[in-house]
Amino acid sequence: MNTKLKPYLLLIPVMTIILGIFTFGLAMGLAQSFGYFPAIGLKDFTLKYYMEILTDKGFLSSLKFSLYISIVSSILAVIIGVALAYSILQSKHKKGIEEIVYKLPIIIPHTVAVLIVYNILAQSGILPRILFHLGLIHDQSQFPSMLFDKSGIGIIITYLWKEIPFIAMVVYTVLSNISNKLSEVALNLGASKRQVFWHVLLPLVMPSIISSFIIIFAFSFGAFEVPYLLGPTAPKTLPVEAYIEYTNPNLANRPYAMVINMILTFFSLVLIWLYQKTFKLISKYSGGYR
C-alpha cells in the first residue's frame, strides 16, 4: 500500500460517518429553510421564509446585537491580548505568568465562566457585597446592572475572560520566536522600545492577530450558551433566536429556524474563507523573521 495514501484510507470510515451526518443535516436544514418540510405538508420550495426573516425587525435587531457583541468583544480581546503578550515577553517571570494567564481561563468551560461572572457581577454578587461593606454603595440597586442588559456587558466580559488568554497565547508564541536581532538592530539605530513594537514586532505578528481575531469573532457570533444564560430578553442573539424558533411546539416555525441557521452558516463560510486567506499570508511571512 502506498504510504502516502495509507492515512487517508484509514480515515475513510470515520470521515464518511462525520461528513455524512454533516452533509445530511446541512441538506435537510437548507431544504427546510426553503419551505420543503413534508412532515407537516410543506412540499413546495419557496423564498417566502427568507423574505419574511430578512425583513423582520426582530431578526434585524438580533443580527445587529450579535454583530455588536462579536465585534466589541473581539476587538477588545485583541487589544488587551496583544498588550498582555508583549508584557509577558518583557517580563522576567515568564513561566509563572504563563501558567496563570494561559491555562486557567482557557480550560474552563464557558458555562462555568458564566457562573463565575454571575457570582461576581450580579447585583447580589461578590463585587456589590464588597462595595457595600466598603461603604461605597448603600443598596444593591446602586450597583449597575451588568447582566441580562441590552448592552450585553455580562456577555462581553465573559467572552473577554475566555478570549484574552487565547489571543495572548497565540501572539506570545509568535513574538517569542522572532529573532532578537531585529529589535537590537532597531535599538542600535536609535529607535525607542515603543517604535520597535509598533514598526518591527507588530507588523510581524499582524497575520497571527488577524487570524486569531477571525477565530474568536466566529466563535462569539455563533455561540449559544453565554448569550442564552446572560443575555437580555430582547434583542436576542441569532443562535438563541434560532433555538427558540426550533423548539417552538408549532412545527410551522421550523423553516424560520432553518433560515436563521443558514444565515449563520453563510457567515461561518465567509469567515473560514477569510481565515484561509490569512493563513496563506502567515505562511508567506513565517520564514522571514527567524
Image: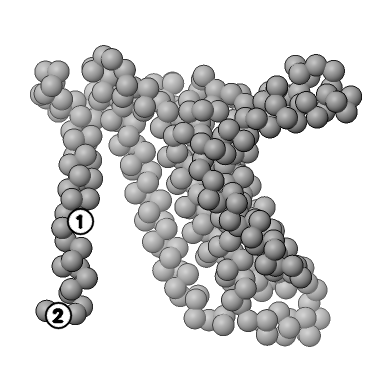
211 over 157 or under it: above or below: below
Amino acid under label 1?
A: Val
The spot of residue 36 in percent (x, y) is: 15, 27
Q: Is 125 left, or right, of 170 in this rendering?
A: right
**Number of on-image labels:** 2
Q: Is residue 78 visible?
A: no
- Extreme-top residue of the structure: 250
Q: Quadrant of the N terminus?
A: bottom left
User: Residue 98 has which mark?
Assistant: none
Badge 2 is on which residue?
Answer: 2
Residue 13, visible in the rendered structure:
yes
Q: Nearer the viewer, residue 11 or 65?
A: 11
The residue under label 1 is 14
Q: Residues within 10 Å of mark 1 (few under 14, many from 20)?
A: few
Residue 98 appears at what percent x and percent y?
65, 62
Q: The C terminus is located in which quarter?
A: bottom right
Rendering quarter of residue 246: top left
Residue at 11%, 18% (x, y): give it: 41
**Mark sitting earlier along the chain (1/2):** 2
* Amino acid carrying mark 2 in the image: Asn
